[in-house]
Image (cartoon, rainbow, N blue to C red):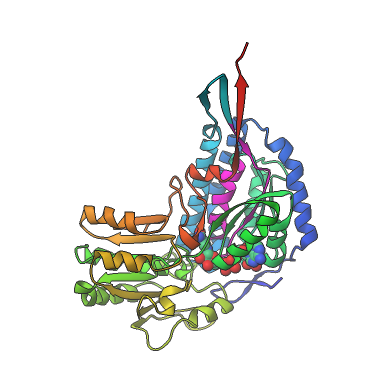
Amino acid sequence: MPTILNPATEEPLADLESAGVEETDAAIAAAKRAFSSWRIVAPADRARLLRRLATLVEEHAEELARIESRNVGKPISGARGEVAMVAQVFHFYAGAVDKHHGATIPVAGGEALTFHEPLGVVGLIVPWNFPLNIASWKLGPALACGNTVVLKPAELTPLSALRLAELALDAGIPEGVVNVVVGAGSVVGQRLVEHPDVAKIGFTGSTEVGRQVMAGAAATVKRVTLELGGKSANVVFADADLERAAAAAPYAVFDNAGQDCCARSRILVQRSVYDEFLDSLVTATANVKVGDPALDDTEMGPLVSAAHRETVAGFVEGEPRFRGEVPDGPGFWFPCTLVEAGNDDRIAREEVFGPIATVIPFEDEAHAVRLANETPYGLSGSIWTRDGARALRVVRAVEAGVLSVNSNSSVRVSTPFGGFKQSGFGRELGLEALAGYSEVKSVFLSTEA
Ligand code: NDP
């Protein structure tokens, strides 16, 4: 396994050994053994264990945030926010354990009951951009429903998941319930997908690998939840509070250095205010604080790896409208970049996953909706307008799973998150996520004498 580096300094952080098929099988076997007793833990006890894990995450928040910041290269302020969300996620699903229950349904000749039952062993495959956060979105509902898990973090960023697994044991969650296997996606990930004892794969990552997961899962008819890529629109109408929209737009793309599936990387601006808005956007982008992720006021760090920086750089052709500054010296830095382009250009069609925003003019509401939807993806997006009726018309017309009005916000613990079209299917977060980690059983009881 490659040495794990700090992307801001290129200094080594850890050397881990890669697991292979044998270790993956051992983790699946441990999860299978643990399932028979974990599934029957009384709901109040399971909730108590999840709550204890949430509290331990809170108690170790600074340690976890520093691990995440150093491993991913993300600013410490962002990492602190993510760890706070991880604790909230475990609190939320602790509270959900005894609320996800079946129903009694009136039928002729008896009574019908439904039960929500765990699936068994679930494989959780997560990417490197929000390693701990995305892991918690899957672990919370999976454990709440009574499943046992094998979590595979991305090879580049396994450190926070390993620490979380220790905290799960400290919380009293029995051995074998939470397993973490570190290794390559093509080995560990693929083995989870094909193994007959794994009942479901919860996957977040690229659309390309998502397709492979879906195809591989077909052989054993595994359940899959896919949270994939995006190419989301930030639609700015002439009637918006333009100052507020321009101040916010950089953070909808450059947060996490653009390595965010929800990045609003296509900024669609109504032509009548295009020049005025672009000037403000350039000024706001120039103010994004890029530098040492360990400093409290840093807003953007480096990209995760040298290879990823090369991929991102390959998207810029010609002279961009704006290119920001980056620190000298080591680190996988890439500047905040604004490009004017057409919606059909490669940079507006493909997911860059780096700090590059494409600015595109539109004529009217119908044109804006058409441009927003002209993409195979459908994950997130924002609409900026002071006209409430227009906001509602546009959010209903845009084909995406997570939208915000006059805000960049994408994610809340209690609201469902997931994509339309090739951004995937299934929902994480909120009570909706519980359906993805349980099976409904329907039972008929005859009341005939
Ligand atoms: P990848 O799809 O390359 O990897 C995601 C995970 O899948 C990693 O753990 C990886 O392991 C694993 N993996 C790779 N190959 C296989 C395989 N054949 N079978 C099973 N698992 C495999 O994505 P990245 O890690 O590069 O993350 C970036 C992508 O993820 C972007 O496209 C982004 O949009 C998307 N993403 C989507 C999100 C969403 O919620 N919709 C959120 C975050 C990211 P390893 O890397 O160790 O080899």
Query: Looking at the picture, does residue 166 appear above or below residue 381?
Result: above
Where's ligand 1: which quadrant?
bottom right
Residue 41 appears at what percent x and percent y?
66, 33
Which residue is rendered at x = 39% and y = 72% of the image? 289
Q: Position of residue 356 (x, y in %)?
A: 41, 75
Q: Is residue 400 left or right of residue 329?
A: left
Q: Is residue 326 visible?
A: yes
Q: Position of residue 274 (x, y in %)?
A: 23, 75
- Decide which of 392, 246 is in the foreground and name it: 392
- Residue 74 position within the rendered picture, expressed as x and y whole percent measured from the top left: 50, 66
Seen at 35% across and 78% down, the residue is 342
The N terminus, quarter of image: bottom right
Q: Nearer the viewer, residue 320 or 15?
A: 320
Please indicate, yes or no, whether residue 56 appears anywhere in the rendered image: no
Q: In the image, which residues are magenta? A: 115-143
396 displayed left or right of 75 = left
Identified at 41% across, 60% down, the residue is 380
Q: Quadrant of residue 361?
A: bottom left
How many tags in the picture?
0
Q: Nearer the viewer, residue 378 or 91?
A: 378
Position of 137 compared to 77: left or right? right
Question: Residue shown at 73%/59% (left/top)?
Answer: 191
Q: Nearer the viewer, residue 63 or 197?
A: 197
Q: Is 239 covered by the magenta stretch?
A: no
